[in-house]
Image: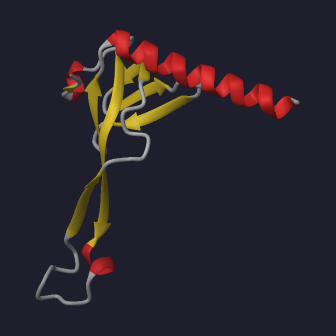
Amino acid sequence: MAKSLAPEEICAGDYVAVLHAVYQYPALIWCDDDALTARDEIIRLKLVPEDSGEPLLVKSVCLPFVLVEDSSGRSLPLDVRRSQLAKLDPAYAKAARGSKKSKRRKHKSRSIR
């Protein structure tokens, strides 16, 4: 089972996945009715991203930022104030990353023909 991580628990070499992302919007975007929310209030939404669960390899940590590498080798910066991360079992993460890489190789070889 994936374990939700506190920011200080994240270490280089860990496999993590984004559980949810937090988006913030000013209340005035949502509603013109001041009785419901103050216009200067911030509305926070927790959403599950489409790629939630994708194993990411932590390359470096400088809180609140975490540099991760996705299965294609692309480096991505994450802000842990906006993303809740979970630690993945290394065996699961390696298997999931490997299966994604093999699918990409098959797709590339088909497009070359």
Q: Quadrant of the C terminus?
A: top right
Residue at horizontal 16 percent and vertical 88 percent from the top: 34
Q: Quadrant of the N terminus?
A: top left
Residue at horizontal 65 percent and vertical 27 percent from the top: 104
Dividing the picture into quarters, in which one does residue 30 lie? bottom left
Up the image or down, 85 lies above or below 32; here it is: above
Is 45 on the left or on the right of 78, as rendered? left
Residue at horizontal 22 percent and vertical 80 percent from the top: 39
Up the image or down, 44 lies above or below 36; here it is: above
Is 26 on the left or on the right of 93, as rendered? left
Q: How many marks?
A: 0
Residue at horizontal 85 percent and vertical 30 percent from the top: 112
Between residue 66 and residue 22, name the one nearer to us: 22
Up the image or down, 96 lies above or below 35; here it is: above
Between residue 43 and residue 1, name the one nearer to us: 1
Is 99 on the left or on the right of 61, as rendered? right
- Where residue 108 appears, as percent x and y from the top left, is 75, 29
Dividing the picture into quarters, in which one does residue 60 lie? top left
Residue 59 shows up from this direction: no
Chosen colour scheme: secondary structure
- Where residue 5 appears, as percent x and y from the top left, is 21, 26
- Where residue 63 appears, as percent x and y from the top left, is 31, 28
Q: Residue furthest left?
A: 35
Dividing the picture into quarters, in which one does residue 53 lie? top left
Q: Residue furthest right?
A: 113
- Where residue 8 appears, as percent x and y from the top left, is 21, 23
Is 21 on the left or on the right of 102, as rendered? left
Residue 94 shows up from this direction: yes
Up the image or down, 107 lies above or below 22; here it is: above
